[in-house]
Amino acid sequence: MTEEERGWLRLHLTRGLGRTGLIRLMDAFGSLEAILSASPAMWCARAGLREAVAADFPAANDPRLTAALNTLEKTDARIIPLWDEERYPALLRAIHDPPALLYVRGALPAGEALAVVGARQASSAGRQLTLETCRELASRGIVIVSGLARGIDTAAHQGALEGHGPTVAVLGCGIDRIYPPENSRLFHRILEQGAILSEYPPATPPLPGHFPGRNRIISGLSRGVLIVEAAEGSGSLITADFALEQGREVFAVPGAVFAPTSQGVNRLLKDGARLVTEARDILEVLWPQFPSRSVRRREDAIAEGLAGDVLNVYRLLGNDPLHVDELARTSGLTPMEVSAILLNLELQGGAEQLPGMRYVRSRNP
């Protein structure tokens, strides 16, 4: 831990100072060294801080400082201040309320980024589409940014890792906390292939009030935001609002009309968000120099060799399992005819049988 990082940490641990106070001190004194050399009375006089805040500035041997320093050293974390022109992400600096300090573990990628967020209680279809989309984008070197939450966030990070590309998890707690705890393995995999970051000092718990601020960082790091499944009033819609405010592109995956987790995304689409059903929809808008290699295109190649009833049954298949009888009712064929078609599709790599005579479109066509 450098002396500069130690100084920033002392300031950040000053109760009541926060992001605004740090920025006011820098505006008033011009450098970290000048701030640390000034007296608390000068802080109040020149930066307009309250006396109680200035008086709480921790001493060099303060237990709070010692504990935080030990944690940062043990986790091999570093502090990147807003005023670091080389290391602080340029897109994030450009938003109207950038974090004064970033705590970072791992290697913060420098490439183009897409934020991906959505419902915690996501459907299997939503998770699968997220995984496939992020896997392809990451394989292009596009950074996938998300929040390590359950559901869509988890699928986004996993897709990036499967695509052997970079991914960044932005936390609503200290970077020494793994939240949710069941994502411990994913947390450490991200560290091997990307970065974990937070604007909160070590030991900060994952309080509900921290997550809206976390969401502005997720969108602020990215060129666009993809929303996959979101109910009205969800945190994902807050991220979309931040994205619009920051001038980012907003993408949304359409959902079933009556599903609660579709209400938010369908409203975004009504309001002008770009509709997404595959990675190509994002690439064409943000990175047209990258031709798509999406799973959908491989599926289209299978469809080109089909016709008649076989093609109709194939088009009925998706990520949600369908029973043979349901496929028969929908297609107008007999269960025996549908079974014969499904066997043919399995042999061609277009269908996959699950227990209970249920079928999905093959995930590996």
Image (cartoon, rainbow, N blue to C red):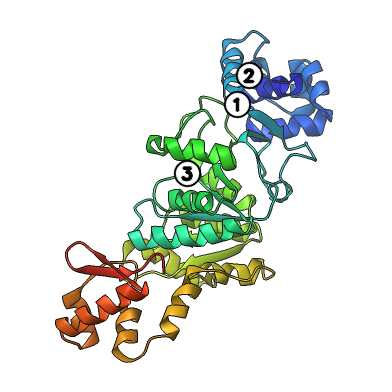
Image-based side of 200 in relation to 178, left or right: right
Observer able to see residue 298 = yes
Tag nearer the camera, 3 or 2: 3
Q: CA distance from mark 1 to mark 3?
A: 28 Å
Amino acid bearing label 1: Gly
Where, quadrant-wise, is the N terminus in this rendering? top right
Observer able to see residue 172 = no
Q: Earlier in the sequence, mark 2 or mark 1?
A: 1
Tag nearer the camera, 1 or 3: 3
Label ID, residue 197: none
Closer-to-camera residue (267/354): 354
Q: CA distance from mark 3 to mark 2?
A: 36 Å
Q: Is residue 60 above or below residue 218?
A: above
Amino acid bearing label 3: Leu
Q: Residue furthest front?
A: 347
Rendering quarter of residue 352:
bottom left
- What residue appears at the point 44 percent right and 65 percent down from the top-left corner? 265
Label ID, residue 16: 1
Image-based side of 193 in relation to 235, left or right: right
Closer-to-camera residue (16/171): 171
Could you say where residue 103 lies in the image, as x and y percent from the top left?
62, 32
Which residue does the numbered mark 2 point to in the structure image?
52
Could you say where residue 112 lies in the image, as x and y percent from the top left?
67, 55
Q: Earlier in the sequence, mark 1 or mark 3?
A: 1
Which residue does the numbered mark 3 point to in the structure image?
148
Tag nearer the camera, 2 or 1: 1
